Image (cartoon, rainbow, N blue to C red):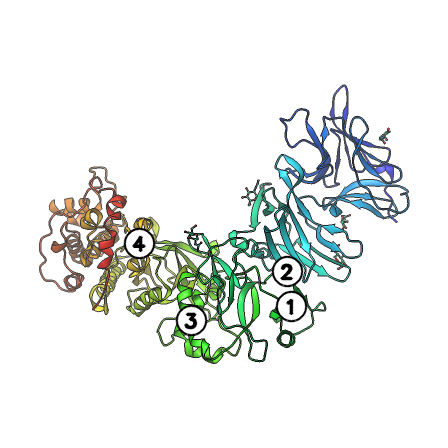
Amino acid sequence: MRKIPSMFWVPLFLLSSSFSVALDYSVITPRDSLKDGDTLSSTDHVFQLGFFSFDQDEQPQHRFLCLWYKQPFAVVWVANRNNPLYGTSGFLNLSAGGDLQLFDGEHRALWSSSSKATKPAKNPYLKINCTGNLLLGDDEEAVLWQSFDDPMNTILAGMKLGKNFKTQQEWSLTSWKTLKDPSTGEYTLSLDTRGLPQLILRKKGDPTYSYRLGSWNGLSFTGAPAMGRENTLFNYKFTSSAQEVNYSWTPRRDIVSRLVLNTTGKLQRFIQSKQHEWNLANTAPEDECDYYSICGAYAVCGISSKNTPSCSCLQGFKPKSGRKWNISRGAEGCVHEVPTKCGKKDIFVKFPGMKLPDTSWSWYDSRNAMTLEDCKVKCSSTCSCTAYANTDIRKGGKGCLLWFGDLLDMREYASFGQDVYIRMGFAKKEFKGREKVGMIVGSVMSIAVVLVAVFACYRKKIMKRYHGESLIKRVGEENMDMGLPILDIKAIYIATDDFSYINFLGRGGFGPVYKGRLENGQEIAVKRLCENSGQGVLEFKNEVKLIAKLQHRNLVRLLGCCIQGEERMLIYEYMPNKSLDFFIFDERRRRELDWGKRSNIIYGIARGLLYLHQDSRLRIIHRDLKAGNVLLDNDMNPKISDFGLAKSFGGDQSESSTNRVVGTYGYMPPEYAIDGHFSVKSDVFSFGVLVLEVITGKTNRRFQHADHDLNLLGHVWKLWVEDRAIEVPEEDLLEETCAVSEILRCIHVALLCVQQKPEDRPTMASVVLMFGSDGSLPDPKQPGFFTNRNVPDVSSSLSRSVNQVSITMIQGR
Ligand SMILES: *[C@@H]1O[C@H](CO)[C@@H](O)[C@H](O)[C@H]1NC(C)=O
Ligand SMILES: *[C@@H]1O[C@H](CO)[C@@H](O)[C@H](O)[C@H]1NC(C)=O
Ligand SMILES: *[C@@H]1O[C@H](CO)[C@@H](O)[C@H](O)[C@H]1NC(C)=O
Ligand SMILES: *[C@@H]1O[C@H](CO)[C@@H](O)[C@H](O)[C@H]1NC(C)=O
Ligand SMILES: *[C@@H]1O[C@H](CO)[C@@H](O)[C@H](O)[C@H]1NC(C)=O
């Protein structure tokens, strides 16, 4: 038996004035009275109980008895949330019998702990234990009442949400009305125990509004990826028995966190930083697709790359209304394309990566013992069973969950979610038809695009597999008959660690690039295209297929692509040495590049470009050749990247694409920047600029010189006409005397490449010849864009001409 002797409480004299003394208690007994201004602190002084006003401007002040984190301040519990005190005359008394009561100045009770103890307490005391639990105890170790049993809007580590079936006690959260008013707000978060228990966030008075975090799958709630994501930081605990179902979490490491249901119905996870601030770690719901059944039955909601939600049917289902529909509450959704027949003919198709449908009308195996095969048997033997899944996904999965009736509120996750097996009608003849519908529907819908693409290409395989399990699966890294590997989005997420910022390599012309490592160990670079041109899947695939066919040792190899909804990704071989700009514009790293290496780079780029312009079966104009688009392999061999993308991903698109397609200031020839005219000669111009940059280690664009206002081109031209070309290269390069003539020839060729008029510039074929021979070269004229001042406002002049530009981009030959 633990006794807390009364000598243990030591009032601290914090503030003293002639009238009153504010006390800081560590424990309160029936002899004490906690007045406004007094506080009760946990022994570690992390938590404190006292009176507080949320709105300092109100007169008289609305005072609340609150429990808070002292540093950084955050209120975590409020006693009299719906019954404020007016003014500072309130006090908290603990009766000898063990009742905790809050009184106002007129001794009216505003709140009481209403403990359900059957017999009077002997030596009651009130204290805050170090988890932030305000504990009303008796010295017989009985807990008479605790704040953890009366949650407000906050869950602290060790607190629980749930329901006790015996006592009917519930633990749920209710939001505050406003940030300045802790009274009962509109939102609640509670465990719904019809069917398999699921956590649901609801809005009062609005039955159509809810966010289903969903059922527990052993690791997390099926609809709350954000809350399962930091499972390296937290231990989540979910228990379900005949007595009680509850959920709680505790930090795994030395971190301090709280989970808050805020006034606008969002769950916010805060984590205390080292600087003692509350940082918002994540939020749920994350997007509009999280709201309950926003697309209706058998449909999934997807967020496009433009951040707009859209609905689509699961594969094998068609819109109920016969056409595309938008998200709305009460949306009709989809129906089976081939009706189920409730016989042996029905099949079950696996849909991986799903948020499990609403389990309100589900059955589950409470012992968590059935296998998936048992589960399938059970479902197929019950006519109204529409789907089945494992209840627990750990260790390969176990337990059985069955649905009856339409499947509502699903969504697809890229790197989260679980397998659902859905009953489908099966008819051999209709199969072809379905495929067609799938293709038409798929092009306008966002979910099953992967499926559809896969469907179209690998029809035979699927036909074979259809009786079996997996429809959507990794299609493989091997080249298939189309010569275009499509990688599974899941594999990409895994490879890039969910596009973790740690793997962020940089931002290319068409989107961010991430490093990744495939399961087989191969390193890849994943370009996530920010915006697509609105092309259909097949068009996109054709485009990528063309690009994938371009193989040259000075081009970065495209390994495959990945399509997910409107999101498209390109998978390239990974280049460990980053890009050329990383070296040549860096004082220190530049020194690693002697002339031998630099000339190898220049010649390599020339050959790669020649291949694009002429030797490949397609004629490709790069349009954005620059140091940042030249990657370097282990041996510092250059590899051009981002080729062939301009047309596919923006060229023939509206305003938004113009700012992306413009190419790069400093590398653009005048006719493009001013008139939007584009040809292979524009790449030649960019190449010329690049050569001069490699030789000088300076950027054309940001070039500055004390003596004049010219850019790099102008500067080189000036030295050239003054017969001082030898001053162009970096001095270090000239140490190899035998290199001098080569360097001078390079400068000469570069000047020819950057001529004002396209017709004065050589083709890449001539450039390669010029490098390879000693023959005499024509004299260059004044280059285009040789001062920084006469460059027009590029983006405005481009927008009107982008269309005609892009037409010339790729021509079959
Ligand atoms: C509260 O406690 C104080 C001090 O123990 C006592 O004097 C007072 O009568 C109590 N008030 C009520 C309303 O119980
Ligand atoms: C604090 O209270 C919780 C909930 O009653 C309890 O589980 C925990 O053991 C207590 N901790 C201490 C240090 O008393
Ligand atoms: C949750 O419920 C289980 C019974 O299902 C019970 O044993 C456990 O103590 C409860 N957890 C908490 C934190 O109260
Ligand atoms: C509630 O949380 C969401 C998501 O973190 C946030 O955007 C919103 O501003 C919060 N509302 C209030 C009133 O703080
Ligand atoms: C969907 O919403 C868009 C934009 O609000 C609207 O233009 C379109 O007509 C809607 N489509 C349907 C089928 O309601």
Residue 392 found in image quarter = bottom right
Q: Of residues 635 and 93, which is closer to you in this image?
A: 93
Q: Where is residue 767 in the image (x, y as percent from the top left)?
A: 16, 61
Badge 3 is on which residue?
454
Q: Distance between the residues labelled 3 and 2?
A: 31 Å
Circle 3: residue type: Val
For the residues bearing labels 1 and 2, Cβ distance under 8 angstroms:
yes
Residue 132 left/right relative to 372: right
Q: In this view, does 270 lie to the left or right of 596?
A: right
Type of amino acid at the residue the image marks with label 4: Gln
1 or 4: tag closer to the N-terminus: 1
State the SS at label 2.
strand
The reply to whether the residue tagged 3 has its Cβ within 8 angstroms of ligand 5 is: no
Could you say whether the residue bearing mark 3 is in a helix, strand or loop?
Answer: helix
Q: Rounded to the nearest whole Å, what is the CA distance between mark 1 and mark 3?
A: 29 Å
- N-term-proximal mark, 1 vs 2: 2
Please tell me how crowded label 3 is: few (under 14), some (14-19), or many (20+) other residues with Cα within 10 Å. some
Of callouts 3 and 2, the N-terminal one: 2
Determine the CA span between mark 3 and mark 4. Answer: 26 Å
Residue indicated by mark 1: 401
Q: How many labels sit on residues?
A: 4
Residue 207 coordinates in the image, percent (x, y) = 62, 50
Q: Are marks 3 and 4 in contact (CB under 8 Å)?
A: no
Q: In which quarter of the image is residue 86?
A: top right
Category of crowding for the residue at label 4, using alpha-carbon neighbours closer than 10 angstroms: few (below 14), some (14–19), many (at least 20): some
Q: How far apart are marks 1 and 4 (CA)?
A: 47 Å
Within 8 Å of ligand 5, the CB of disc 4?
no
Q: What residue type is labelled 2?
A: Ser
Q: How far across and down, in percent of the image, does residue 747 sit?
A: 17, 53
Question: Which mark identifies residue 215?
Answer: 2
- Which residue was labeled with disc 4? 653
